[in-house]
Amino acid sequence: MPQPRYKRVVLKISGEALAGDDKTGINAEVLSKITDSIIKVYEMGVEIAIVVGGGNFWRGRSGKGMDRTTADHMGMLATVINALALQDSLESKGVPTRVQTAIEMKQIAEPYIRRKAVRHLEKQRIVIFACGTGNPFFSTDTAAALRAAEIDAEVILLAKNVDGAYDSDPHINPEARKFDKLSHFEVLSKRLGVMDSTAASLCMDNNIPIILFGLDEPENIVKVITGEDIGTIIK
Ligand code: GTP
């Protein structure tokens, strides 16, 4: 069995990744493929914390004409739907999980408590963080950076709908050039749209490497963990 390169990781899954070709909502087949890959990594003994986005239902910035804070709160609720779907899928396959929310909704999930999250990881439970950071104006990428710093994760695996960082949007520009390696500073100075600047600077200040890769092929999660050179590494 290939050996994992990391002991504790934060896996950021964008909401869009759960929608697959449907573009919105949750595609059951895609969800199941993603959780199968997560379980392969889990079975290697890797401690996995997942931060999930909500863009398959709602994005704060889509609330045109709407109060931004309200729109972001709606986005946070969207992440809870995805977190519960991931929990349900993982647990139906026998893997224990805990969902923790940055905004309390105790009837649905545990509130985010750092020490409890770490304890869950030590007890081989997958922890799923929902509601982003719990604050408007922050993305779920920033939540991934914050949680990774808090729980001492070695790396952030940033699963996106592109297979790495490009010098321009590859969905728009077919000539876009992919980077294999970047520094956090380059992500900031080149204003690359792969992640927001708050997330990049938080990772830079706390020395957290990020591996950006495409989740169109769910098996990529396993490849990244075992050290295959796919996507873009930011460190
Ligand atoms: P350990 O005590 O470390 O073994 O962790 P544990 O999660 O098994 O213990 P706990 O008694 O805290 O939780 C038991 C179950 O209740 C788990 O499924 C938790 O996710 C759930 N749970 C704990 N706190 C809350 C909460 O505030 N709200 C909700 N909805 N569930 C909770």
Image: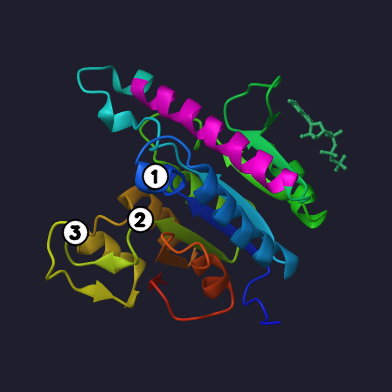
Q: Position of residue 203 (x, y in %)?
A: 44, 59
Q: Is residue 187 above or below residue 149?
A: below
Image coordinates of residue 131 in percent, x first then y, are: 52, 33
Q: Quadrant of the N terminus?
A: bottom right
- Reading the image, the residue beneath label 3 is 169
Q: Is residue 171 above or below residue 28?
A: below
Residue labelled 3 has its Cβ within 8 Å of some atom of ligand 1: no
Is 81 colored magenta in this rendering? yes
- Mark with earlier residue (3, 1): 1
Q: Position of residue 208 (x, y in %)?
A: 50, 64
* Residue indicated by mark 2: 161
Is residue 65 toward the left or the right of residue 96 in the image?
left
Residue type beneath disc 1: Glu
What segment carries the magenta color? 71-92
Residue 75 among magenta residues: yes
Mark closer to the observer (2, 3): 2
User: In front of the other: label 3 or label 1?
Assistant: 1
Q: Secondary structure at mark 3?
A: loop
Against 26, residue 190 (above or below) is: below
Q: What residue sits right under mark 1 in the picture?
A: 16
Residue neighbourhood size for the residue with mark 3, other residues' Cα within 10 Å, grouped as few (<14), some (14–19), many (≥20): some
Q: Amino acid at mark 3?
A: Asp
Residue at 37% x, 36% y is 24
Marks 3 & 1, CB-CB < 8 Å contact: no
Ligand 1 is located in which of the four quadrants?
A: top right
The answer, for residue 49, to whether it is visible in the render is yes
Labels 2 & 1 near each other (Cβ < 8 A): yes
* The one of 32 and 173 positioned closer to us in this rendering: 32
What's the image's color scheme?
A: rainbow
Packing grade of label 2 (10 A; few <14, some 14-19, many >=20) is some
